[in-house]
Image (cartoon, helix red, strand yellow):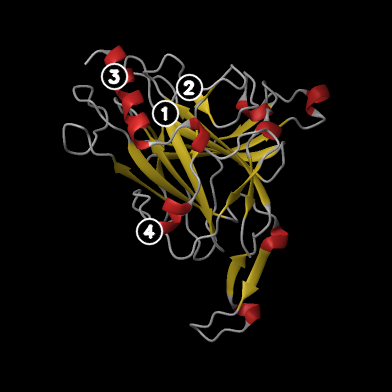
Amino acid sequence: MKKTHLIAFAGLLTALFWPSRTMFPDEASNAVSDIPKCSGPVVMDGRLDETDWKNAASFPVWYIHGRKGEHASEPPMVVRYLWDDLYLYIGYEVFDTNLVAVGNGAVQGPAGNRRQGCSIWENPPGPKVDVVEFFITFNDENFFWELHHNASNQFNDVLIITGLPRWKQEKPAMVPYGIYFGNEEYLQDEGEARFASAVSMTEKPAGGPSTVNDPRDADAGYSAEIRLPWYGIGAPATARKRVADESSGNSAGAGRVVWAMGGREIRILAVCQNGDAENRYHHSSPELAGGWFHTQAPAFPLYRLKGP
C-alpha cells in the first residue's frame, strides 16, 4: 500500500472511532482539566477496557510541533489519565498503519523491575521509529521527567533539569543546550507501588492484531497503559501519608504508604512521533511553540487530580 493511501486510511480510522474536535475537553492555555480517581484496581494489560478508562476524558495529541495552535484534522494519538493512592496512570491509543518499534539495547530500572529501553530517533539504515513521549512535572519548570514508550512495550525514563539560574553564567559542559538529560536515572518504586506498562495491538481491518516492524500489512495501531508510582515521579512529600495496614494489624506508624493527591495539580505534555508522517511530531499543547519541549514546561497542559 502506498504511503499516501496509508495516511488516508489512518485518517479514516480516527474519523470512525473518535469524536470530532468539538467533543474534546477545553484546550485553552489557561484551562485546568480534571483527572478522575480510580474506583478500583487497574489491570495492566494495555486494553483500556475498565469502566474508569471509558469514563475518563480523552485528550487529543494532534498539535503540529513548530506551528503554535495548529493541529491535524484527526489526532494520531489520544491520551487519558487516572490516579489513585499509589499511582498516576496513563492510557493512550495510537492510530498508525505502519508500526515501527526499535529497542536501544539498554536495560534500566530498580532491582526486580528492570525494563528494556527504546530508540527515539532514526536508526540508519532502518526506518524511522514510532514512539510516544510524556513530560511530567508538578509545576516545576526546572525539574521533571521525560518518558518514552513504544508498541513493543519498551520504555525509557530521563530525568530533566533545565534553566537553572547559574547556568547562564557558568555554562556547565554537561548541559550544552541548557538542559541536563539524566539518562542514567530511573523511576523508583516504593514498597508495593511498582512501575508497570503494557500494550495491546488493535485489530486490523483485514483481521488479526496489528503487527510491529512488518511493512507488508496495514496496521490499525495499538493501545497502552503506563503505571507510575507517585514517589518515582517526584510528587510533593507533603502528600505522602502512612496509614494502618489492616490486613497485618500494623499501627498507623508502621503501616503502608499512600499519597493524598486529591486537589493537587500536575502538568503533562503528551507527544507522538510517527516516522512515516510528513509532520513527524504532534503534541497535546495548543500553546507550545517550536524548539525544545524541555524549555516550555509552563505551556504543558495543566490537570487537577479530582477526588479526596
Residue at x 66%, y 64% (from the top left corner): 240
Instruction: Indicate which disc, 4 or 1, sits on the residue closer to the N terminus.
Output: 4
| C-beta proximity under 8 Å, tags 2 and 1 | yes
Residue at x 36%, y 31% (from the top left corner): 14
Q: Is residue 50 above or below residue 207?
A: below
Residue 247 is situated, as x and y percent measured from the top left of the image, at 48, 82
Categorize mark 3 by other alpha carbons within 10 Å: few (<14), some (14-19), many (20+): some
Q: Tell me the kind of residue under disc 4.
A: Val
As helix, strand or loop, the secondary structure at mark 4 comes to loop
Q: CA distance from mark 1 to mark 3?
A: 13 Å
Q: Tell me the kind of residue under disc 1.
A: Pro
Instruction: Indicate which disc, 4 or 2, sits on the residue closer to the N terminus.
Output: 4
Instruction: Indicate which disc, 4 or 3, sits on the residue closer to the N terminus.
Output: 3
Question: Which residue is denoted by mark 1 in the rendering?
Answer: 76
Residue placed furthest toward the left: 207
Question: Which residue is denoted by mark 2 in the rendering?
Answer: 72
Mark 2 or 1: the one toward you: 2
Question: Which disc is residue 43 wearing?
Answer: 4
